[in-house]
Image (tube, rainbow, N blue to C red):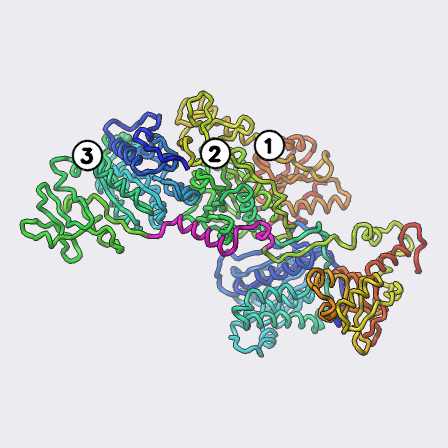
Amino acid sequence: MTKLKDAIFEDVESITIRFAGDSGDGMQLTGTQFSNSAAIFGNDISTLPDFPAEIRAPAGTLAGVSGFQVNFSSEDILTPGDAPQVLVAMNPAALKANLPDLVTGGTIIVNTDAFTKGNLKKAGYTENPLENDSLKDYVVHKLPITSLNRAALEHIEGLTSKDIDRCKNFFALGLTFWIYDRPLDTSLEFIERKFGKKLPIIAEANKTALQAGYSVGHNTEAFQTRYHIKPASLEPGLYRKVTGNEATAMGLITAAKKAGKPLFYGTYPITPASDILHFLAAQKNFDVRTFQAEDEIAAMGSVLGAAFGGAFAVTGTSGPGIALKSEAMNLGIMLELPMVIVNVQRGGPSTGLPTKTEQSDLLQAMYGRNGESPMPVLAPATPSDCFDMAIEAFRLAVRATTPVCILSDGYLGNSAEPWLIPNPDDIEPIVVTHPTAPNSQNGSGKFLPYKRDPESLGRPWAIPGTPGLEHRLGGLAKQPETGNVSYVPAENQQMNNERAEKVARLANVIPEQEVVGPQSGDLLVVSWGSTFGAVRSAVMRLQKAGKTVSHAHIRYLNPFPKNMGDILDRFDRILVPEMNMGQLIILLRGKYGTHNFIPFNKVQGRPFTISEVADRIESLL
Amino acid sequence: MTEVIQLTRKDFVSDQTVRWCPGCGDYAILAQIQKVLPELGRPKEDFVFISGIGCSSRFPYYMDTYGIHSIHGRAPTLATGLKIANPNLSVWVITGDGDGLSIGGNHFVHVLRRNVDLNIILFNNRIYGLTKGQYSPTSEQGKITKSSPMGSLEQPLNPISVAIGAEATFVARTVDTNVKHMAEMLRRAAAHKGTSIVEVYQNCVIFNNGAYSYATDSKTKSENVLELEHGKPMIFGKNRDKGIRLNGLNPEVVSLDAVDESELLVHDETMPEPSLAYMLSRMRQPAFPEPIGVFRDVQKPVYEEGVMAQVKQAKAQKGEGDLAKMYGNADTWEVVSSEFDDEYTSVLFHGENTADRDVAHALLTDTLADLSPKKPLTAHVDISLADAVARLKEVNVGFLALVDDDGNLAGVFTEWDIFTKVACKIKDMSQERVKDYMTPNVTTLGRSDTIAHALHLMAINHFRHIPIVNEDGKPEGVISFRSVVHFLEENFAPGKTNGKS
Ligand code: SF4
């Protein structure tokens, strides 16, 4: 019989925990395990990994601190949580780097064994913070995790001391499982799956560490309070956890499969987009053809070639890669072939903040090419929305025979949330027609590659290998219909007009913009991309508190939804929070004239927190 | 399949006016390609010409095939993507010395090392033509041009040496004026599986006229050009009286008057090691005759075939991609429409008539005894599965407590167990013992535990029932979620009087 220990249970709605340690300490794994277990238990979760920029920064230093934040809740949550309430710090550097984020009064669990003179010095502490009163505002649990873990594992034969110490992250995980009343099953199964067959001793070691950590919680007086977070009430169905990059990859595969096409992914490795490549490279049984090119330029060139050949062609990169790809993207605009460009944005300019998030490539996506180069731009709002937007991108690309840009970002790409697994049969097929006969109406038997569809203004996507439709495409200015090189002024004007118009007409087939809250009034918050979670939560929090504020979150940035202008006209003031210095505002002003726009900008490599946004809104009310 | 129609040169001539300067070497190359393509026995729609930027890169416009006039230096990248998308096509890359070796130098070496099945024709005129006469990466050092009025400082690249350095599998050189030789090189390039690179000495009449006169002038060419032939000794000269002999590691020119033919170097295109081919590529005027012909022709795996083989292998191993399987390939969990559905929840948390007594408070203070738990249906743990199911059916309940000889609770058997472990799985239930299908190690509570505690367990563990045991561990009751709801309805639902205080 299970007998529950008489700890005090405190019911809480949500908890945010951050696991932090050296990049070698396995904190990403620990955080992932914790979130998996919470998710399977039915909590809504949202995660935020925080990688160091240096892959192998010296152990114990601030530069080498790696973190993973999990927010789990009984409510529907939209962000990985603002400030963590609990910090698990495996060494002094992890404590130092993360303490500023912890809420006052929060809980700190530290591994005292790692607080050696050397480590303290490496972290830049002159005094041991565990021995003075610098942590008096927090609840600190000091545990010799390294030695407790060693003691727990010493009886297992065949383990080196290095092996043993590597298990200490599971020890810490076991402890947090106890505190938050999570079952160990998921993680035990995970260990078995990962090591069981190949390395049974390592599997046993990790399981023992996990259970030992749990028992320490159980037996230590220090932990008087345990927390319950009830399962969240999510829409019924089968769920999994998904990151934005995984969702993007699955969306791309789905789009290709729904069109009966091979998926071509030509790319060059770049943080934080490479996970998409890794995911796709493992799915070749879907006729996914990945190509790791010699550089960003070659990657984009290969996408043009593959699109010409009739594949669903995609590249994925980040801002610096887009800079290099721009010339070939522009050729894509001229060739008028369907393709998708995924930009998982990171902090810029230049190499910037490779592992941190920002949304400052919006204007680059819109205008970062020579000449008039209109390109549709979509921005997923959440990790799972990346799936839908990847499919949507292809739908629009095929319709208007054009490259389409998806602006994801490092935060969306790496964060995870529960995803209601869709039924593939419910996803609309993407209908692609390749012409097989000449299209000129004068009986000449000629094929006119730029004779447009009267409604969409897309052009026929004729592919090599089709008899009788031989044609040449190129980057030079063109004659309408024939596509022959032409420098005739009026013809160049017409082709520019048509390329702009066909993108603009996509507004006829995209959903209208929604407004949450009053449909007109004083204050509207307008956001786009990954800020959705923080902004929507902030708005809802204020609405619950009886404040009057509305929110419009834009997923289609070019073209904007048809009713965008009307919406803006109905509000006196429009607050625009962005993780850049005000790029959406420039677009909105340019298109809809001078409304009372209020910028709210941040470029700190981190997502907005709910409170930040809520405070800003409140200051305006 | 369409019938193979015998194509002619004319089939490959587009309706566009050719706009190269009169006398440009490009005309000869265009003519030879248009002549050779019909001989290859492939339908016209299978040919694709992709170029970069430069004089030579206008080429696709003049071919009535599929084609792309792309951007400067990038033609190999488009060609690679196209071949991966459709490996059946015959793809030709048209480039020049500036396009292929300067701005496109990176792509040039990488396409060669990958061995994509393409034919690259590099028009080498050793000058920038389209931009009007600057020195190019193949211009000789000291070249006087508009951008190098005092002579260029740079050492030139030798396209054949670069290609061999990148371990290209087919490398050849020809001359624009030697059309028969050019046609043969084009045929050989087309026949080769893998990347073929053919360098064509091409005369730019406007900006670098006569750059190759030593190799084209009928008076001097046989002295200055060495025609490579596989398996044959290397002999050249108007009277075929000179040869190439190896002296240590270096080639030397010898006179056949003094040296026997048997001492000469014999050409071997197929040597796996590229050293001989590289050595030949280093032979330049005026010290040596410049070789033309096939330097190297070896077989290596073709890139796009490798790509397709991996797709095939993945399908064989994992089966044709199944979206539902891919979506579910992770830890998954089911969210069932909760028993705490809206109606109940509203009673629980937003009860309309809770003025006198707070529901939450009641749940925290009232005990399970207040729910007057029912006696559970009980049976001995050793009964058969068939008997257990029959008992549940008989009494029409969903919960059976199983006890051992001492009457202690050994486990429970519920409709959920039937649903998950028994239904559709067990043929003969009389042969099975309920012990193996029950839930052992049951979480239990006592009569004095709070209702809140029970609700909490139900919520986090999705329990429908919880057995109540006495101090000795003997089952004395069972509560279900429904009993809690009834309790709440009794005491708190609108219209009822509020319960005890
Ligand atoms: S400039 Fe030179 S290479 Fe260009 S077309 Fe004229 S002759 Fe030919």
| Marking on residue B210 | 3
**A446 to B328, vertically: above or below:** above
In which quadrant will I find the N terminus of chain A? bottom right
Q: Nearer the viewer, mark 2 or mark 1?
A: 2
Q: Which residues are magenta?
A: B300-328
Residue B32 pos. (x, y %)? 26, 34
> Disc 1, ligand 1: is the CB inside 8 Å?
no
In this rendering, does residue A451 appear at all?
yes
Q: Give the Cα separation between the discs numbered 3 and 1.
A: 58 Å
Main secondary structure of the magenta stretch: helix
- What residue is disc 2 on? A461
Crowding near pointer 1: few (<14 within 10 Å), some, many (20+)?
Answer: some
Q: Residue at x 77, y 68 (%)?
A: B412
Q: Which residue is mark 1?
A: A507
Is residue B67 visible from the viewing direction of this image?
no
Disc 3 secondary structure class: loop
Three-letter amino acid code at disc 2? Trp
User: Judging from the image, what secondary structure is the residue with disc 1 in?
Assistant: helix
Tell me the quadrant of ligand 1: top left
Q: Chain of mark 1?
A: A
